[in-house]
Structure formats: structure tokens, C-alpha cells
Image: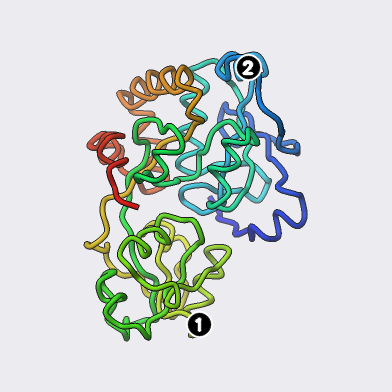
Amino acid sequence: MRRTEISRRDMLRAGGAAALAVPVTGFLGGCTFTQPGSGQPTGSTLDRLKQQGYARIAIANEPPYTQINPDGSVTGAEPDVVAAVLKRMGVPRIEGIVTPYESMIPGLNASRWDIIAAGLFMKQSRCSQIRYSEPEIVSTESFAVPAGNPKKLTGIAAVKADPALKIAVLPGGFEDGALKTAGVPASQVVNIPDGRSGIEAVQAGRADAFFLPTLSLNALKTEGIEITGAITDVQQTGSGAGFRQADADLVAAYDEQLKALKATPEFDQILGRWGFSGDAARSVTREQLCAVPG
């Protein structure tokens, strides 16, 4: 499957955060464009999703977590898992809405979408604002650096020890929060809008490294850029689907069907397609990942 990079800025500029409606069956069916809704939903969200036959999900277009295909359809590790679970719940379609990470929780709580399905890693601050499902994907973190890793970057401690180092991150992403939690000054952080811009920042010397999940960086790997091994001084990261605090019944129903999916080969096949381990997702709990500082 060919990967396509679409700038979040371009998507927002061209379509006003256009939503991409994708049939769940097969995940890669034809799409139609809609605008994300606004206003507060009435009644049970679970009932509404079943009645309308689709759920709006926030995505980021960051492979392998989320991806927009050349035909405009939405896929990626988390949307594919969410689609499979929702199908079991009687909700046959998803609509993906591209949005920056820092806007996902505010947009969810403002009812602009029903679920966050973007690999938005669990941590204390996020778990206090929304309800997560049990873990769906677990991953590691790395740096993208110039070939040969001239600054010998292996972890966050090395960044904090050298005030001259500049690290590129996606604002509002887990990595941004990890640097803040570790006490890395804002003067060392270079905010970039998307994955390709992070690689370009390293290539141009505007940043010494780009901090992102290992698999995301592998998908962006370019000549002259090296991906470090997994960083050891950042806690284990993982995500589940994100829901509004008020949607406890929806989360309970979702977790029930997610548990059933995890017991089947289909779960491993979905994650394996994107380079993730089903066993890794089964090895941790929501409570463990929500205990991550930040």
C-alpha cells in the first residue's frame, strides 16, 4: 500500500477540516466529503451512532497510526481497529476528520467528533479529560537524526544536558509532553506541523532531531536521515480510542467488543499490517498507561 503525505495545514486550508466518510467493511471503500458537526448531541451517543450508522473519528494522517490513502479513504492502525470494533457494535461506517493533535480533545468535548482514533497516547493529563478504551496499540519512541547521529542522541536526558540542541515535535503530541515533563526548555523545542516538516527541519539543520514514534519515523525515513533505536528514558506509550467523559455506556460497550476482537486472529492481522504487535496491546491496561506522567 503506497503511503501519501498530506499536510494538515493544506487539508485545513483546502477543506475546512473536511471529513472523509469511509465504509467500515473492508475499510477502503469509496468516500464522500462532509463537514464535521457542531453542537451538543442529545440522548445516548451509542444509540445515535447506531441510528445514524456512522461515527465521526478524529485522525491526524500520521502513518502508521492514521493514514489517508490516494483515493481519499481513511485507514491506519487505530482507525482500522476502531472500524472493526464499531462494526461489531452495529455501526457500519466511520468518517475521518483530520485535525492537529492539540485540537483533538477540545474538539471531542465540543462534539465536533464522536471518537478520537489517532494514536493519541494515554497519559495522566489526557486521561483526566476524556475516557479511553482499553489499549489498542502500543509503541516505542525514537529520534530521526542526520546519518551517523553526529550528536549521539539516545534519549531525553542527552537533550536536557545540552541547551544548544533543538528537537522538533508535533505540538500537543505525546513527545511534546514528554519533553515538557522532563523539564526540557521551550527554547530547545521546534514546533512543526506534520511529519514531513519534521524530517525537513532536521535536513535543513533547524533541528538536531525529530522526536516521534519509531514506526512513524520509519515510514518517513529519507536518504541522509537515520532513525535511532527505541528511547529508553521515556515511559511505554500506547493508545486506545478516546471518548467524552459522559459517554460511559459507549465506552463500556466498546471495551466489550474490543476484548472480543483481541481474542481473534483478526486483531493481530490488523495491527501486523501496520507493524504493531497484538500481544503488546494485550500486555498492558488502560490504568497502567493512564499513569504515565504528563
Q: What is the spatial separation of the Cα atoms under label 1 and label 2, in whole angstroms?
A: 47 Å
Choose between 38 and 27: the one closer to the eye: 38
* Residue 147 in the figure: left or right of residue 241: left
| Residue in view at x 42 percent, y 74 percent | 167
* Residue 184 in the figure: left or right of residue 75: left
Q: Residues within 10 Å of mark 2 (few under 14, many from 20)?
A: some
Q: Is residue 228 above or below residue 18?
A: below
| Residue in view at x 43 percent, y 17 percent | 253
Q: Which residue is mark 2?
A: 48
Q: Which quadrant of the figure has residue 30?
A: top right
Q: How is the image coloured?
A: rainbow
Secondary structure beneath dot 2 equals helix
Q: Residues within 10 Å of mark 1 (few under 14, many from 20)?
A: some
Q: Which quadrant of the figure has residue 51?
A: top right
Q: Is residue 20 above or below residue 84?
A: below
Choose between 194 and 75: the one closer to the eye: 194
Q: Which residue is mark 1?
A: 206
